[in-house]
Amino acid sequence: MQLAKRLDLVSEPQTIKMAKLSRELKAKGINIIDLSIGEPDFRTPQHICDAAVRAMEEGYTKYAPVAGFPELREAICTKLKRDNGLDYAPGEILVSAGAKHSLANAVLSIIDPGDEVIIPTPYWVTYSAQVQLAEGTAKFVNCTIDNDFKITPEQLENAITEKTRLFIYSSPCNPSGSVYSKEELAALAEVFKRYPKVYIISDEIYEYINYTAKHQSIAQFTELRDRVIVINGMSKGFAMTGWRLGYMAGPQPLIQACEKLQAQFTSAANSIAQRASITALLGDLAPSHEMTRAFHARRDFVIDELDKIPGVKINMPEGAFYAFPNISAFFGRSDGETTIHIDEDFSMYLLHKAHVSTVNGTAFGNPNCIRISFATSMEQLKEAMARIRTAVAQLS
């Protein structure tokens, strides 16, 4: 069968591949602890589920406006003002079928063939794939563990060329958990001010899973407002992954362009999920804060356990629910059967030796690391870390 050549530009995300492999091994009766998945293990809060039931009972089961229900766009504006101090009008909001959909809308609306997109590494796997599908060129900037995996103003300045059209980053970051401070964002903003043709996508999907004092958005710097696209959604902070509801906030001409594009691909996002999201955004946030407290405790446990393993180098993730340890010290080591040459070897070794699923760092642009999700119970994490310690101790 002859298929479109664009399919050769992308491959199955490693995160999905590892989750699939874990399920296959579980189906064979192997007790796999899956630390590869980027999904809260909590159920959607009951008051949000109740709102979905009410929406169906009230007849919200038909097509919604492509850009989203006006009440939801208003609720998003309220949330952005309440939580982030950002002033947006409903016409500057677009609701989509997940934050990934919002990202695709933005990238496809901005990038022409040959345009360059700066992506600090490590990065979420989908960024580069979407740039490739838009026929742009992803320009990666290597950010190391010694700088908490954050891009510096100097690195940004050196990466920008006359072809640069877009910069994409996340804070809190998937996979490193790094969180940019207001001062760090201000320093980057000073660079962007000198390059008015560069758009900025700020992926803030992990905003509520933040262990610092306050989430900071680069959209707060008014000089950049007309070039910043804030991406967010309901999946992480509200445990609503399956509801597929994301949104973007940005300059109205871009929002209108994205709406035009979305109308040809999916039309509106799920109407019931939209009505429930109004309740989520404007209702009781206590369940979200409770989830974050649980993730915080798990973070502390996992980092402490990783820090005890000789050869592992780890930063302190200030947000999201991932650890991203540098495991390059194990390259060249063997347990007598398996030799670790690269990060993927290490992940597969943990999968088959310890029966713990992780994701290799190459998938995120850093071949010296692996990603470990702590979005599972403390009981599972304790068992997983014990297995990892035992397996790693056999490498010499």
Image (spheres, rainbow, N blue to C red):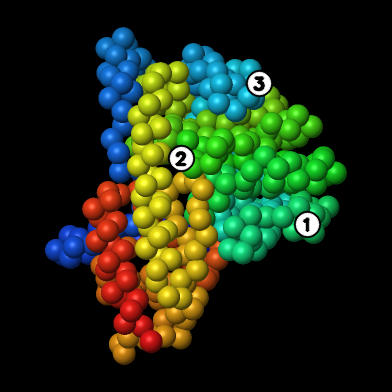
Gap in angstroms between the C-alphas marked 2 and 1: 29 Å
On residue 87, which mark appears?
3
Query: Are circles 3 and 2 on residues that touch, CB within 8 Å?
Result: no
Q: Nearer the viewer, residue 84 or 274?
A: 84
Which residue is denoted by mark 2 in the rendering?
209
The secondary element bearing badge 2 is classed as loop
* Residue drawn at x 55%, y 37% as measured from the top left: 213
- Residue 130 visible in the displayed image: no
Gap in angstroms between the C-alphas marked 1 and 3: 30 Å
* Residue drawn at x 69%, y 28% as measured from the top left: 251
Hey, what amino acid is under mark 1?
A: Glu
Q: Place residue 23 in its image quadrant.
A: bottom left
Which residue is denoted by mark 1 in the rendering?
154
The image shows residue 65, relative to residue 155, as above or below, that is above
Q: Badge 2 local density, few (<14 within 10 Å), some, or many (20+)?
A: many
Instruction: Tell me where residue 331 appears, x and y as whole percent.
Output: 47, 81
Hey, what amino acid is under mark 2?
A: Ile
Q: Which of 164 and 46 is in front in this view?
A: 46
Dot 1 or dot 3, earlier in sequence: 3
Q: Badge 3 local density, few (<14 within 10 Å), some, or many (20+)?
A: some
Q: In which quarter of the image is the C terminus?
A: bottom left
Query: Are circles 2 and 1 on residues that touch, CB within 8 Å?
Result: no
Gap in angstroms between the C-alphas marked 3 and 2: 22 Å
Q: Place residue 237 in its image quadrant.
A: top left
The secondary element bearing badge 1 is classed as helix
Dot 2 or dot 1, earlier in sequence: 1
**Of marks 3 and 2, the one in the foreground:** 2
Hey, what amino acid is under mark 3?
A: Asp
Q: Hey, which residue is sitting farthest top in the picture?
A: 58
Instruction: Tell me where residue 97 appears, x and y as whole percent.
Output: 45, 33
